[in-house]
């Protein structure tokens, strides 16, 4: 555990990656470095990628702090970039044939907890949600700029929200009066859209609706599904014989992409699916880290 992020499936990921001394690995989603440090501590040499400069800075500082104590932490190369270009990033950094690659998708606790990043629906913050601060479009740009139909599609497809029609209608009405800039504004619009006369919606229902709407916006701002779709085949091409790809996802849209991609790889006889069914966290992991509740882990092994 670290103060930036509590890693999910730490032990399982390392076991599946089958980490060997002096072999190379890529951590495509560095975050707080939990998986990277664990691979390095098992003797692996790691390329850690993250599109969020704050993750890179955090891990860089951590390496500095620990350099004198733990030599293995020097085995980390850090790159601020999008894993959508994983093949190019790997080649530039001398990781063109690796024994394992891990993707631990979504956002870190650091990103969620730092309100100014705008990922959280708790409290009040500006609707930003960019993992990479150089991205041009923020969540507030989508909320204020998309048509009602586009918002409806967004909440339906990326949030799987069944009341998307009313929510998008309320957004369009509200923003005619004043632009929607903050999470509190958006939450109150969602609540209005859901209002059943004479009934109060429970705080649990409110939270799950907000979660779906915020998830949809976050996925769109960061183009998360396309990033994943584009990077998995590239990642496969970087794996050495018997090299493994471990993917941890947090919602069904991501998991579906991973599942279908792995099935395609297998059909093309590029290797085998190691996890016939996705691995879910055990009771003790969920108790320690509630964020792990929806996690699913899938593994593919390349055979050349
Ligand atoms: C769940 S956290 C990873 C946590 C990390 N495994 C750990 O144990 O500390 C996901 C990280 O992936 C990064 N990320 C998400 N999509 C990315 C992408 N397309 N390219 C690069 N980094 C990405 C996020 O910025 C975030 O820091």
Image (cartoon, rainbow, N blue to C red):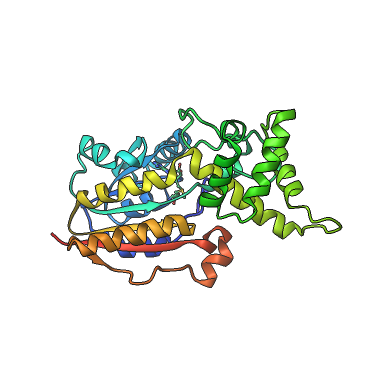
Residue 225 placement, left or right of 272: right
- Is 113 displayed left or right of 62 in the figure? right
Residue positioned most to the front:
149
Q: In which quarter of the image is residue 207?
A: bottom right
Asked if 275 appears above or below 158 in the picture, the reply is below
Task: Tell me where residue 46 appears, x and y as whole percent.
Answer: 29, 46
On the image, the x and y values in percent for residue 36 come to 36, 49
Count the numbered circles shown: 0
Residue closer to the observer: 277 or 110: 277
- Residue sitting at x 84%, y 55%: 197
Residue beneath the point at 61% across and 39% down: 148
Image height of 189 relative to 274, above or below: above
**What residue is at 23 percent from the left and 64 percent from the top?**
266
Question: Depth check: 63 or 276 in front?
Answer: 276
Query: Viewed as shown, does residue 90 lie left or right of 226?
Result: left
Residue 242 to residue 65: above or below: below
From the top left corner, tell me how far across and down residue 131 is, in percent: 48, 38
Residue in front for this viewpoint, 294 or 161: 161
Q: Quadrant of the C terminus?
A: bottom left
Residue sticking out furthest to the right? 198
Rendered-image quarter of ligand 1: top left
- Please give left or right for residue 153 compared with residue 89 in the image: right
| Residue 5: x %, y % from top left | 51, 49
Q: Residue at x 40, y 63 (%)?
A: 297
Report if residue 292 is visible in the image. yes
């Amino acid at each position: 555990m670290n103060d930036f992020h509590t890693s999910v499936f730490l032990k399982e990921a390392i076991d599946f990656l089958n980490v060997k001394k002096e072999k190379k690995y890529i951590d495509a989603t560095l975050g707080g470095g939990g998986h990277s440090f664990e691979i390095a501590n098992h003797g692996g040499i790691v390329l850690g990628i993250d599109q969020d400069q704050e993750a890179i800075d955090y891990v860089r500082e951590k390496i500095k702090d620990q350099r004198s104590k733990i030599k293995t932490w020097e085995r980390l190369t850090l790159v601020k970039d999008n894993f959508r270009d994983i093949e190019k990033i790997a080649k530039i950094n001398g990781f063109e044939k690796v024994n394992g690659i891990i993707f631990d998708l979504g956002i870190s606790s650091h990103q969620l907890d730092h309100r100014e990043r705008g990922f959280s629906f708790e409290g009040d913050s500006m609707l930003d949600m960019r993992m990479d601060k150089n991205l041009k479009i923020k969540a507030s740009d989508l909320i204020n700029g998309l048509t009602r139909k586009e918002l409806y599609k967004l909440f339906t497809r990326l949030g799987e929200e069944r009341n998307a029609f009313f929510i998008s209608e309320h957004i369009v009405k509200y923003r005619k009066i004043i632009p929607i800039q903050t999470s509190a504004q958006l939450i109150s619009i969602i609540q209005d859209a859901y209002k059943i006369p004479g009934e109060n919606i429970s705080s649990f229902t409110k939270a799950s609706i907000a979660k779906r709407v915020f998830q949809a916006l976050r996925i769109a701002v960061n183009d998360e599904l396309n990033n994943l779709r584009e990077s998995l085949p590239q990642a496969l091409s970087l794996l050495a014989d018997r090299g493994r790809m471990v993917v941890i996802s947090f919602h069904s849209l991501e998991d579906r992409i991973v599942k279908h991609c792995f099935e395609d790889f297998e059909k093309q006889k590029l290797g085998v699916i190691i996890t016939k069914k996705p691995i879910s966290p055990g009771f003790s992991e969920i108790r320690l880290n509630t964020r792990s509740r929806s996690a699913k882990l899938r593994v593919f092994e390349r055979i050349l």
